[in-house]
Image: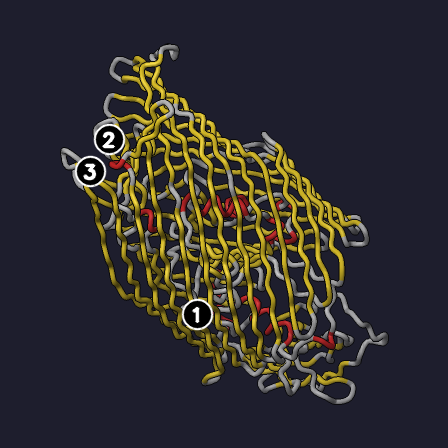
Amino acid sequence: MLLLLLTASTFFTQAQKVTGIAKDENGSPLVGTTVSLHRAVDSVVIKLAVSKENGGYAFSGISEGNYKVSASNVGYKTVFSAVFSVGASEVIVPELILSKLATALSNVTVTATKPMVEVKADRTILNVEGTINATGSNALELLRKSPGVSLDKDENISLAGKNGVQVYIDGRVTPLSGTDLAIYLRTLQSSQIEAIELITNPSAKYDAAGNAGIINIRLKKNKSFGTNGSVNAGWNIGTYAKYNGGGSLNYRNKKINIFSNYSFNYGPNQQSLNINRTVLDSLFDQHGTIRMVGNANNFKVGADYFLDKKNTLGIIVNGTLSDPTMTNYSHTVISNTTTNTVDRILIADNSSTLKRHNTNVNLNYSYNDPRGTSLIVNADHGFYKMGNDQYQPNHYYDPSGQLLLGSTIYHMLSPAEININSIKADYERNFIKGKLSFGAKSAFVKTDNNFQRYNVEGSNEELDKDRSNHFVYKENINAGYVNYNRQYKKFMIQVGLRLENTVSEGVSNGSKYNGTDYSPSSSSFKRTYTDLFPSAAITFNKNPMKQWSLTYSRRIDRPAYQDLNPFEFKLDEYTFQKGNINLRPQYTNSFGITHTYKYKLNINLNYSHVTDMFTQLIDTAEKSKAFISKKNLATQDIASLTISYPFQHKSYSLFTNMSTNYSKYQADFGEGRKVDLDAFGFNFFAQNSLKFAKSWTAELSGFFNAPTIYQGSFKGKSLYSIDAGLQKQILKGKATIKTSVSDIFHTLRFRAVSDFAGQTTRFSSRWESRQFKLSINFRFGNNGVKPARQRSGGAEDELKRTQQSGGMGIGNN
């Protein structure tokens, strides 16, 4: 409340404009000069600006007080102005004259250290590239430890207590979800990743999909001039040893930028999974050990051709070739709860050979005018080829485990292909003292999944036509948006509206026994719907040291294609899974208020109302058998509070993030089939870094997730972990050695309980979370920036173009 009163009082103080011009020693305007406004008393930076073509810069909304400005540009000496006072009238700063460095350098190497975590109005950015404890990790492990992110037993991702997260890679949406997405994220090593963006308040520029927001994983891309590259190698050990390696090779001059990288990883990972299920008078006590051997190759190659200072053409090709294998050793004791005696024992050890191949091609064009006009066009094609060859024996033994009572053996083949084609254009220009942007996108997705199950008897296999299915799903989304933002004297506004039209169609083909023979059987569905997705934000920034923001957005989460397939899949002897053609999209309306104090303390309060929320339910089928399906829960209401603060003192830095959320789930499916849950979630994340002895850095990080509800029906227990790492720079900074230990105290495990429709299920799972990791990275070639070759658009325009190329246009929104 005190902060609120202090902040409110600043709205009535005088605020003025500060303007000036930056020139070189010959009197010519210096475009692209970074100008900083400092508080005179302690030199703290209040605002930043970049000079325009005429060398001019301006700061608006400046409160009364004493200030000074500094100007810096590549190849020039930084210069400071004299101290001046801001009062009741506009201040014009005397011309800032920058002189060239005494020694003309052919290359200027700029060394900058990004903070481990950055918090902005609409997103939190984890700069993975410089984090020691990210060493030897993959994208899924990094997300598990990210602030506000949680994963359930099936590794579905939620953000700030909400499911329905949309995952992007380099600004392009991935069509994968659930297990397929988790397997893919495991193939992305930390050495490939530059940053992870947790975007909780996307503007109308982004796809409306993703109720909880967007997670964008940015892969590394060359930004340096000349020829340069790197090689890296790593070794981890938990239960089993694993290794990874890779390299990059890049070349850039004033006309072309060619970049490439490759990485591979190999290693077995072991996981224990225990499921205790009680239904009617039967108890199924399952204990399993899953061993997955990962084997993945990732590649990325691309080029940018600078037609002139404003126009650029680009192409990017990237992909993954992964062929993991998985072995599941499963032992289930089946008991009668009435007599408390063991009835039989099921041994269901199975093996799978998986295929996860994908290739993506992006063609992009960008036009960037330093005066404020830009056009970004992206055309994308993605092809995903997946497969699973699974051998599933089921052997039943008597209570002693010695006498074989009977066996059923299955062989299952499930090849799948996903084709994605999209084109997108984003245009932005100055308009009525603000920025107007609009654009359109058209996307076509086709998935083809052919599931075949064979009954095995000895050396013979016979196709089970009752349990085989071919499912084809098509989806076309056409969208358009308009977005406008403007800075007023005391506040900034942003309003946007997105329209999306969705046409989807699914056809499920199989066979049905008619009493004498099998005949073709088919079912299908088709849907067409159009939605509007408004978004708005207003930021009160009269005093930049104390800012308030109010936000609103409406978003959608569409069902995954496999959740719509009406075919009934038999997972094992007692577990079935079936899609739901009546599964509707879920919609979320979110309202938020954010306070930023001194560019450090961020406090965000958010309320979301979710309608038609879908979740996975375990129902009873044929008495003792489990029936897994997804249905729309009636509503979900979520209130969340997030507080983050970075602290820096000399060579020590600390980032802390605390988020809490309260969820209310309600649904009624009839007698004995009701869901009414209150859930409270709490997440704490902290990362410490200490630099010492010039070339050494130590890091300690950890997170804690309090007990909460997953997917509306699973009551999960707490999760927590602590990591520690050490880094050493060698060979005059050209090489880095990193070592770390993840989950030092081996506390990370998943535990949850579900109680629905007369069935109680308890889950527990552990994996190789505690690992010792060692890596080395060596950089070679030129890592500097050549001022003579820098395009007039400057680093700011280049960063914007780089982020927007590659599909969805992750930019400054």
Which is in the foreground here, disc 2 or disc 1?
1
Is the residue under label 1 in contact with that under label 3 (CB below 8 Å)? no
Q: How is the image coloured?
A: secondary structure
Residue 498 % position (x, y): 36, 69
Query: Mark 3 and mark 1: span between their CA atoms?
Result: 46 Å
Up-down: is 204 above or below 264? below
Residue that numbered label 3 is attached to: 518
- Residue shown at the point (54%, 35%) measured from the top left: 293
Query: For residue 235, what is the image quadrant?
Result: top right
Q: Amino acid at mark 3?
A: Tyr
Check the image and report above or below for 184 versus 49: above
Residue 585 coordinates in the image, percent (x, y) = 29, 55
Q: Is residue 629 visible?
A: no
Q: Is residue 646 left or right of residue 254?
A: left
Residue occupied by mark 1: 424
Real-space CA distance between mark 2 and mark 1, rounded to the nearest whole angstrom: 49 Å
Mark nearer the N terminus (2 vs 1) = 1
**Residue at the spot of label 2:** 758
Looking at the image, residue 691 lies above or below residue 595: above
Q: Residue at x 68, y 58 (%)?
A: 249
The residue sitting at 50% across, 58% down in the picture is 360
Q: Residues within 10 Å of mark 3 (few under 14, many from 20)?
A: few
Residue 663, which numbered label?
Answer: none
Disc 3, SS: strand
Which quadrant holds residue 436? bottom left
Q: Amino acid at mark 1?
A: Lys
Amino acid found under the numbered disc labelled 2: Gly
Q: Nearer the viewer, mark 3 or mark 2?
A: 3
